Each structure stands twice: as structure tokens, then as C-alpha cells.
């Protein structure tokens, strides 16, 4: 049993927040296949405080998705803090997560996402503002190893975040400059785990049961976050959960895969504009 603040998590398998992917239908599919915690797509703090309809819709969820985290990002501590207060009051998620991991230039150029990792003082200010605004809801962080290979700061940043009051850290063990290329350095996850007392969630290059076993063995992390490894294979959570509980697992055959993809499309149709549902269906069918 993993504890993040007062939240008890029976199955410490986390669906990573992914832009354009972890919407309500995909979260629900992964939840039914055994994901212990799911996250929304990352949401702009500026969009939240302006009460942008599209932004607010990205954060809506159903009770069967709990425990669920809403991930926010921004570069202004006051704005991000205010957005956290609104998220907490309007949606009451189980976790509020701060995005210090997105490497996309249009996000990082302002100092948001992994761009904040170039400025520990800014990380401190944003994190403090969010914690202060979130009352009893645990605040967590998803971050990169650092900006580039010459500026690896994950352990130093993690110790600072723990001292401020962060309840858990998910470390994607790549730098911002790596984007999604190269190999994740799991040694950094182990180093962070040894340096802090709060839960550390390993992320990066976990695509199957074997890589799950390896990251747990090599890092001693408290939980594992899976992103791209779940695309088209949401049953990866069930395979790992069954392994942890010493239960057998049978990989889905073609018919089961088709049925899962149809269920996914039905959820998209019921929750999206038809044109959006079609476009997302094509994307997910390619993954399946």
C-alpha cells in the first residue's frame, strides 16, 4: 500500500498524463485494466483562471476514475497558485500535480513545464504557491532529470521539493533536451529515492512486464508511471498488477483487442464532438 499524503493507493501503477491522449475515455479504459492512479492531460493555469470552457472540460472526470490527479502547468507562481485553488474547489481531485516535465518548446520557452528546471527559485515559488492553495489535497510533481546532460538537478530539486511539502515525485529520467529520444537514466531515479523520504515514482522506458521488473529492481522506486507503453496496450496495467499479486495473465487475442478498441471508440463518441471523436479514433486505432 502506497501513501501519498493521506491518499492510500493499493496498486502503485500510474497512467502518465499525456497531452491529447489521457482524456476521459482513455483514463477509463486504463482504469478498468488495472491502473491504480490516472491523470488528466496537463492543463494550463492561465486557461483555468480565465475559466476557458475547453480547459475546464479537460478536467472533468467521473467517480469511477478515482483516485485521479489533475496536472497543471504555468510559469507565474501567483497564477498557478490561484489555478490550484480553483481546481481544488471546483473538481476536488485526489491529487494536484505540477508539470515540470513537458519538454515541448512552446511550453518551456516561458519557463513552464521542464523549462522551470532551469530556475530552482521559480520551482520553489510555484510549488509553494500550489501547496498553499490546495488545502488538504496532496500536491505531487512530475519532473525531468534536468534541462540537459550538463545540468542534471533531479536529486537537488527533489530534496528541495520535499522540504517545501510535496508528497510524491514522479521522475521521468530523461533531460528536457532529450525530449522522448535516447534512453532514460534509471540511476537518477535510484539516486532520488535514496535522497528523499517521500514516494518516488519511476518513469521512462517502461513498456512491458520485463522493463517494469527491471526498473523496480534497479531503482527501488515506490511506484511506476507508464505513458507511451500503454498506447494501444492498456492491458499492460493488468499484466503488471497480476504479476504483483501472483495471478496468471493471458494476453488479449485479436478478438479481445478489437472489442477493447470498439469500447474505446464508443466512449469517444459518447463524450466528444463527432469530428473530434473520429480523429481520436483514427489515432488510437493505429496504436491498437
Image: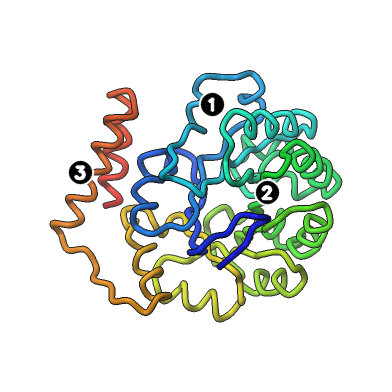
Q: Which comes sooner in the sequence, label 3 or label 1?
A: 1
Image point 13% across, 57% down: which residue? 255
Q: State whether residue 158 is above or below residue 186.
A: above
Q: Quadrant of the N terminus?
A: bottom right
Give the farthest residue toward the left: 255
Q: Are marks 1 and 2 in contact (CB under 8 Å)?
A: no
- Would you name the residue on which mark 1 appears? 55
Mark 3 residue crowding within 10 angstroms, few (<14) / some (14–19) / many (20+): some
Q: Are marks 3 and 1 in contact (CB under 8 Å)?
A: no
- Would you name the residue on which mark 2 appears? 138
Q: Secondary structure at mark 3?
A: helix
Q: Label 3 vs label 1: CA separation?
A: 27 Å
Q: Nearer the viewer, residue 244 or 109?
A: 244
Is label 2 or label 3 in front? Answer: 2
Mark 1 residue crowding within 10 angstroms, few (<14) / some (14–19) / many (20+): some
Q: Which comes sooner in the sequence, label 1 or label 2?
A: 1
Q: Are marks 2 and 3 in contact (CB under 8 Å)?
A: no
Q: Secondary structure at mark 2?
A: loop
Residue 262 is tagged as: 3
Q: State whether residue 266 is above or below residue 223.
A: above
Residue 168 image offset from top left, x and y in percent: 67, 58
Amino acid at each position: 500500500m502506497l501513501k501519498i499524503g493521506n491518499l492510500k493507493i493499493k496498486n502503485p501503477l500510474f497512467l502518465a498524463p499525456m497531452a491529447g491522449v489521457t482524456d476521459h475515455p482513455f483514463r477509463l479504459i486504463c482504469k478498468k485494466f488495472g491502473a491504480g492512479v490516472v491523470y488528466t492531460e496537463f492543463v494550463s493555469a492561465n486557461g483555468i483562471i480565465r475559466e476557458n470552457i475547453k480547459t475546464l472540460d479537460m478536467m472533468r472526470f467521473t467517480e469511477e476514475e478515482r483516485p485521479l490527479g489533475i496536472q497543471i502547468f504555468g510559469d507565474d507562481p501567483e497564477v498557478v497558485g490561484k489555478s490550484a485553488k480553483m481546481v481544488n474547489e471546483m473538481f476536488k481531485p485526489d491529487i494536484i500535480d505540477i508539470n515540470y516535465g513537458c519538454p515541448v518548446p512552446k511550453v518551456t520557452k516561458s519557463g513552464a513545464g521542464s523549462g522551470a528546471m532551469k530556475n530552482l527559485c521559480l520551482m520553489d515559488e510555484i510549488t509553494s504557491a500550489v501547496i498553499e492553495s490546495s488545502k488538504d489535497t496532496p500536491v505531487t510533481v512530475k519532473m525531468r532529470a534536468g534541462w540537459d546532460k550538463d545540468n542534471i538537478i533531479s536529486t537537488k530539486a527533489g530534496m528541495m521539493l520535499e522540504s517545501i511539502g510535496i508528497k510524491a515525485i514522479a521522475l521521468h529520467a530523461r533531460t528536457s533536451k532529450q525530449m522522448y529520444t535516447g534512453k532514460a537514466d534509471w540511476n537518477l531515479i535510484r539516486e532520488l529515492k535514496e535522497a528523499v523520504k517521500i514516494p518516488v515514482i519511476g518513469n521512462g522506458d517502461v513498456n512491458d512486464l520485463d522493463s517494469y521488473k527491471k526498473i523496480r529492481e534497479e531503482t527501488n522506486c515506490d511506484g511506476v508511471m507508464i505513458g507511451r507503453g500503454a498506447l494501444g496496450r492498456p492491458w499492460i496495467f493488468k499484466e503488471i498488477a497480476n504479476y504483483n499479486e501472483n495471478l496468471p495473465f493471458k494476453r488479449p487475442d485479436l478478438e479481445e483487442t478489437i472489442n477493447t478498441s470498439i469500447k474505446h471508440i464508443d466512449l469517444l463518441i459518447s463524450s466528444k464532438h463527432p469530428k473530434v471523436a473520429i480523429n481520436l479514433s483514427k489515432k488510437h486505432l493505429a496504436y491498437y
